[in-house]
Amino acid sequence: MARRRTKKRTHLGASNGTSKPQPANISASRAPKSMVIRIGAGEVGSSISQLVKDVRSMMEPGTASRLKERRSNRLRDYTTMAGPLGVSHLLLFSRSTTGNTNLRLALTPRGPTLHFRVEKYSLCNDVRKAMKHPKGGGKEYLSPPLLVMNNFTSPTPTDSKPPAVPKHLESLTTTIFQSLFPPISPQSTPLSSIRRVLLLNRELPKPSSFETLPKEDGSYMINLRHYAITTKRTGLSRSIRRLKAAENMLKERNNKRSIPNLSKLEDVADYLLDPSAAGGGFTSGSESEVETDAKVEVLETTARKVLNKKQLEAYRRSDNKNPHRDTPGVEKRAVKLIELGPRLKLRMTKVEEGVCNGKVMWHEFLSKTKEEMKEMERVWEERRVLKEARKQAQKENVERKRKERGGSHKTAEVEDDILEDDEWDSEGLEEDDEDGMEVEEDGPLEVPAG
């Protein structure tokens, strides 16, 4: 006789993770995790698919880099698994019916959601081809990037007119982007772990070009850039740096090809002082000097002897202390940023409550009067009351069936009554085009060389 199927996902007694009560602020204590998803896997095109892969590499290491979407997947599938997997952010790329590429940034499990239109973008391959010496993939992606944000809070207007984007929405957008990566503590975070930087620059709204309309442009534009941080010691010529690099290469890879050819020279001083000797020496001031703004002072990473208990006590009792032990070594380094890609130019079009399904808090193209706002509040309140009543009825049905089957060993096999019938918008952004405006999508940016 066939064994009866046991429903394990939504019923009483289902093993959906631990049954212990979780603290209310558990999401704040964990490191943020994200999923970068393309909605409609076979419909977005090859360029958007590659853009999704580039954004996943940018969000490393706290993202699902090997996530594979199916054409049959819906948004509900990802939101259902976000809780058990500890995912805090969803980045959803999709293509609307008008051909625009859209990005939705949502916080799980209760939102809010930021809707962006991707105005322009450049893939990582395009950025590398435009550079003379591109940066290869190494240990940069083992730690999260340093987030730098600029102009996210607009200055206070001098006149009494309200700003195009409310102040509380600017603060909300800033908080959402800050929560994408774990916070950095200057006292405990080692400098060697910061290998990348993510720059977000908001273009402040400019006055309208029409003389009859002196109001500000209501667009909210964000430019995204992704760089790798490289440093080198200053005050040394290129020849000395080549000798130091050759020594490191010999220690690591035993590669003799990196050693400069000094066979035709009588002394090593000829290599250090003669500009034409072995291709080294001082040829210009730019080889040994860098700009003052690019110099920083960091602690020298040298190994120190660990004292035992007796030596530590003797060191504390001694009056003649070693000044070099108390003063750590400081060295000057030149900082250089090498772009990794991708590049994105985002235009925020809408902010709504919930995960892609909630009350619209702000819309770029639509504005409502006070009466319309009150009507919208009334409609959403009715929906909330109806949803609470439906949940209560479902709970009563579960309790009733549990009592009816109380003597059975399979009390978990109750009817499937607790699935919610909420509909999710998972195939593009139909609501984003409700203003009737069609904007042609720009292709990848032509990145200038250098």
Image (cartoon, rainbow, N blue to C red):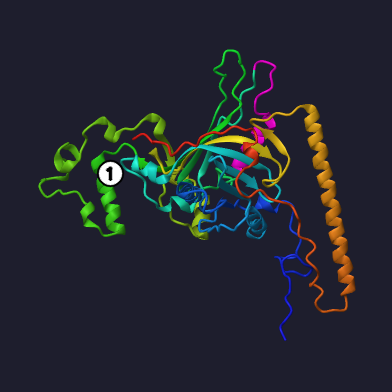
Does 298 sit left or right of 398 as displayed?
left
Secondary structure of the residue carrying tag 1 is helix
Residue 329 in sight here = no
Q: Is residue 167 magenta?
A: yes
Q: How many marks?
A: 1
At 58% across and 48% down in the image, what residue appears?
Answer: 92
Image quarter of residue 269: top left
At 82% across and 79% down in the image, what residue appears?
Answer: 409
Instruction: Return the residue found at the far bottom.
Output: 1
Is 211 placed above or below 57 here?
above
Is 416 placed above or below 273 here?
below
Which amino acid is tagged 1? Arg
Is 198 placed above or below 387 here?
above
Q: Which residue is mark 1?
A: 241
At 46% across and 51% down in the image, what residue appears?
Answer: 141
CA neighbours of label 1 inside 10 A, class few (<14), some (14 to 19), many (20+): some
At which x and y percent is residue 7? Answer: 73, 71
Residue 99 or residue 303, whichever sits in front: 99
- In magenta, the rendered stretch is 158-179
Is 428 placed above or below 349 here?
below
Image quarter hosting the C terminus: top left
Residue 347 in sight here = yes
Q: Is residue 230 magenta?
A: no
At which x and y percent is residue 163? Answer: 66, 24
Does 447 sit left or right of 93 as displayed?
left
Instruction: Return the residue found at the far top.
Output: 211
At which x and y percent is residue 240? Answer: 25, 43
Image quarter hosting the N terminus: bottom right
Residue 232 or residue 151, whichever sits in front: 151
At which x and y percent is residue 273? Answer: 18, 37
Does 280 sit left or right of 308 as displayed?
left
